[in-house]
Amino acid sequence: MCAANKQSSNYKPLTESDAITLAKRLNLFENDSQLTCYEIGDGNLNLVFKVTNTENGESIIIKQALPYAKVVGESWPLTLDRSRIETNALIKQAEFVPQYVPKVYYSDESLAITIMEDLSHLQIARAALMNDEDLPLLSNHIGEFLAKTLFYTSDYGLNQHYKKELVKQFINPDLCKITEDLVFTDPFFDHETNDFEQELQKDVERIWNDQVLKLEVAKLKQIFLTKAEALVHGDLHTGSIFADEKETKVIDPEFAYFGPIGFDVGQVFANLLLNAISREPKKQNILFTHIETTWTVFVEEFTKAWKNDAIEVFSQVDGYLEYVLSEIFEEAVGFAGCEIIRRTIGLAHVADLDKIEPANKRISIKQLALKLGSELVKNRKSVTNPKDFKEYTIQTALSSL
Amino acid sequence: MCAANKQSSNYKPLTESDAITLAKRLNLFENDSQLTCYEIGDGNLNLVFKVTNTENGESIIIKQALPYAKVVGESWPLTLDRSRIETNALIKQAEFVPQYVPKVYYSDESLAITIMEDLSHLQIARAALMNDEDLPLLSNHIGEFLAKTLFYTSDYGLNQHYKKELVKQFINPDLCKITEDLVFTDPFFDHETNDFEQELQKDVERIWNDQVLKLEVAKLKQIFLTKAEALVHGDLHTGSIFADEKETKVIDPEFAYFGPIGFDVGQVFANLLLNAISREPKKQNILFTHIETTWTVFVEEFTKAWKNDAIEVFSQVDGYLEYVLSEIFEEAVGFAGCEIIRRTIGLAHVADLDKIEPANKRISIKQLALKLGSELVKNRKSVTNPKDFKEYTIQTALSSL
């Protein structure tokens, strides 16, 4: 699928004891601390070592990229350069929202290592939401994270000369290719990476044969391929967010590149929607509220940044901010539709849907997801308000009865 | 205005005798040839040496970038990296249309030198058109040049992974900044780089106060800043084209970067229009025909390439090609409008307008240019056919009476 760069001659996967040695060498703990280390990753893409001082419980994470991705039993080569991208993205984001990203303590490109703050006191937001926890500040924080990281890395808020140097640093062909294939292409064709229950065959064929839908997906893919608007996270689903009632941290920006602002916003919308439809109707409201709040806070913070810090002289022109925001929203709605479809029938699913029991309920909710995703892609120009998501979801569900 | 990169320690401007020595060292002529050399550039941006074998008249051009730009008496530092960009762009374009670009014989990044085919048997197209020469194949050739260089460097026709590596190679902040300022910004504000006759003051103020126009220019500038669609030439006016009745060569791609396809197309439209309005009405038709032919041939060649060589799987989807072409045309119309305005009141004028005599005629044609440019920017969605340019020009002229 994607060619790995030639490995640096230095590179070797760490063992748990290597990780302890490294932490000691870097003086990341007090002298003579007793350290333990466990590899806690899922082993598919990265090694994740948690190194703990047994005396006071202080801990750090050492994340090391592996030169392959294991997906459904297969092993694809995957560039180690993603470790450089992740480190640099975390550092760049911390300039604007240090409160929402893990601290980076150290990185080593040749070993593809990032050493960072341990966030294991928090939960993955997807798991928390599936567990009916409210995460009351999640959407406030994510709205601000999106507004600040995206505004201040765009031509609106960043020296346009320096932005181009950043575009160059964040050229990320291998990981972009994964998104181009898995989000924007394979689910819309009869491709071997797709993965869905046999009961969905007819619904999936309807997507493959929907020329209007495919034309709109083609346009959205073109935007993803060409629109170098801001340094997007690139994989901002609820599995990339750690949270509790008070704190929110966005992790894993290895897909970061200069792309459309609406892509990050749309992935957030989509993953909140996917959780919403997985629930009983009476428990859905909190998710629709999270969607509304994400957008409202995004608009507030983006507007504040625009008014205070815009570098683009046209920012003062009547209507320009409103135009930019409406374009971001329209694209976000379309990207959300693609994400919902691919999370239902593509290679990488979400537990929100896959864990639904019994099976017939799961199938009918996945059918709803496919319809909702298609409607959002096709009607993205008429969805103009985040409240519309709730309306659309209810209407789509009703029309399926 | 733009910071020059640190000069390579090797760099020094050549003299005419250095140029001869270099040509000999590289064996660019037969042994023992008698060579003469003249510096024939205008000295504002580059040294241009023509080295000739006095025995058989064979000649080459040695072009060397200077570390500054002299404009209206001022000297701005300007990166030598533009020489690398120019060489690489010429070589890349020659992969698709060797017949329309000068051959590159040699380049040296540290000296900022490109050695290439001498085209002095041809005329600069602007001068030829001002001299009432028809250049009957100009628009056929330019239409094909645009279609092939732009299609085959876009995500439609180029491996999407490799395209991203090219985007990185052609990051060109200094020269893009010149366009961002001189085409998309300064003419729309009361900026010191602007240059226009006092008689135009009211017309220019109308532009500065036209909020609708400025909002549309802001959108076009955003597209120029962010849309990495294809390797555009970036400065494709009629002064960058050598031609005669049979041959056409596009030169000087030092502004090349990955930008919107419509930018190159729009600059061609604009410079043909500027020549058209500089003429008596009865002599304008040939220019409107050139505009139509440019677009018709562009569409034919782009469509042929799309059908035969598209790498994007969505290229087969009904309506996608038509959508892409209509988006290119719409953007080209808008970019043409910006170009017409900036060539009338901005820093860099065109001789087509400036040479008009007597002065009152020149002023009234410049007034027409400003109106036409504004209309094209504001109404670019309703200009859908290249024939509309003629209609628009006539209507705008009539409404000015």
Image (cartoon, coloured by chain):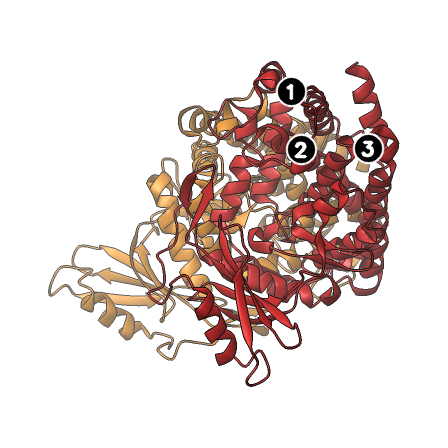
Chain colours: A orange, B red
Which one is in front in this view, the residue at disc 3 or the one at disc 2? 2
Q: Quadrant of residue A272?
A: top right
Image quarter (top left, top right, bottom left or bottom right) of the C terminus of chain B = top right
Query: How many numbered marks appear?
Result: 3
The residue tagged 3 is B389
The kind of residue on which mark 2 rests is Lys
Chain name for mark 1: B
Give the secondary structure at mark 1.
helix
Q: Nearer the viewer, residue B340 or A227?
A: B340
Let me know if marks 3 and 2 both belong to one chain: yes
Residue A279, can we see it? no
Answer with mark 3 or mark 1, whichever residue precedes in sequence: 1
Residue found at x 78% / y 56%: B244
The residue tagged 1 is B212
Give the secondary structure at mark 2.
loop
- The CA span between labels 2 and 1 is 31 Å
Q: Position of residue A240 (x, y in %)?
A: 48, 50
- The CA span between labels 3 and 1 is 21 Å
